[in-house]
Image: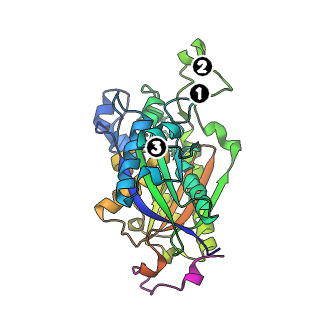
Amino acid sequence: MQKRYGRITGWGAYVPEKVLTNHDLEKMVDTSDEWIVQRTGIQQRHIAGPEETNATMSTEAARRALAKANLDAADLDLIIVATTTGDHLTPAVSSQVQHMLGATDVPAFVLSNGCTGFLYALTTAQQFISSGAYDNVLVIGAELLSRYVDWTDRNTCVLFGDAAAAFVLQATTEPCGLLSFDMGSDGSGSQHIIAPAAGSAEPVNASTFEEGRHFIRMNGREVFKFATRILGTTSQRSLAQAGLSLEDIDRIVPHQANLRIIQAAARSMDLPMDRFLVTVHKYANTSAASIPLAICDGLESGEIKLDDRLLLVSFGSGLTWASAVLQMAPVQSHQVYTNGASAPAISELVTA
Ligand code: UT7
């Protein structure tokens, strides 16, 4: 069988209308716009309204992506929703999205991996396509974290936002889509980002509820150290697997958690900040939605071009990490190289 790739033919994002600014937060907890901007780069976040759910946000993002791809929901072969904040513990929100899209009988599942969920899901989708099992796969990254944060805890409530973003991947033999990936996990750091009483280990009861143990708790400093350590390492692994170097990448799209983490990654990779796409000031940390939302935003603003080759890199709860080289359009049409070189041969780019 000829090698098969998953071309990104459609993309779409949904962010709730309601915007919560740092100044709004000043009225809710002991914080300041100055502290939040200096320590995180975040200026505002979007928060879901009472009628909105993970399923409604995911479905809207998916509809936009399908329209861009000019594909009917019924023609999908698989739907993967990367999220940790589905509408219910069970059923998985992916089935609700499948039903709301009208994607009759299409298999659907949730991939629950926090902020790295979307890159894990994209990699999973790519395996179904490259094996020949499926041709059209919808991958959604969605998170409704505003319902899982303690709005009295200034350590966490200033950091997160709600959003959903979706990609349509379609099989092609032209080299594009995910050219390489790296993923990893270190559960010894599981306590650093945790909602202790939101699972089966510690069922919610009156006392856990009283202590707010169903909310997200985070050891920000440890996560910060982990992130700055892992971003460069996993990026190099993905680049090496694709036979590429940083000079061959048009734009780096990091997980949008904290501007200082992105700046530290830029320093460790010895790159100027303008090589990194930054949207954290507008949307805050939207976890599994962060990378696809940043790409949709970049495509809309023109900061990302359709023939760009992107390095995607993420870290998050678990602790986990993931990175990938994503070629938006087939290699042949890739003209823009930051080092000014002409497009290398496909055999140089893609490992067998
Ligand atoms: O997607 C992955 C999810 N997580 C992350 O990416 C988080 C990674 N970590 C971070 O982004 C940063 O560690 C934070 C933004 C969470 C915190 O920044 P920091 O520079 O590491 O601050 P810190 O935790 O060391 O806290 C410094 C001070 C503390 O006060 P004291 O103990 O020095 O008096 C905090 O209580 O800042 C205080 N503080 C705040 N002050 C005003 C913490 N949150 C706030 C706040 N407003 N919102």
Circle 2: element type: loop
Which residue is drawn at the image coordinates 37% and 41% (left, top)? Answer: 35
Residue 248 appears in view: yes
Q: Magenta part mainly helix, strand or loop?
A: loop
Q: In this rendering, is residue 71 above or below 325?
A: above
Report how far apart the C-alphas of labels 3 and 2 lie in the structure: 24 Å
Q: Which mark is residue 204?
A: 2
Pointer 1 residue: 198
Q: Which mark is residue 142?
A: 3
Cβ atoms under marks 2 and 1 closer than 8 Å: yes
Residue 282 left/right relative to 75: left
Residue 153 left/right relative to 230: left
Residue 23 left/right relative to 294: left
Q: Which of 299 and 125 is in front in this view?
A: 125
Q: Residue 303: horizontal and vertical position, in percent?
A: 33, 65
Which span is picked out in magenta? 335-352
Q: Please rate how many residues cluster around mark 1, counting C-alpha atoms within 10 Å: few if below 14, some from 14 to 19, many from 20.
A: some
Q: Looking at this rendering, what residue extends furthest in the right direction?
A: 188
Q: In this rendering, is residue 194 above or below 239?
A: above
Report how far apart the C-alphas of labels 3 and 1 lie in the structure: 18 Å
**What kind of residue is marked 3?**
Ala
Q: Residue 265: horizontal and vertical position, in percent?
A: 51, 61
| Quadrant in which the C terminus is drawn | bottom right
Q: Residue 339: horizontal and vertical position, in percent?
A: 44, 82
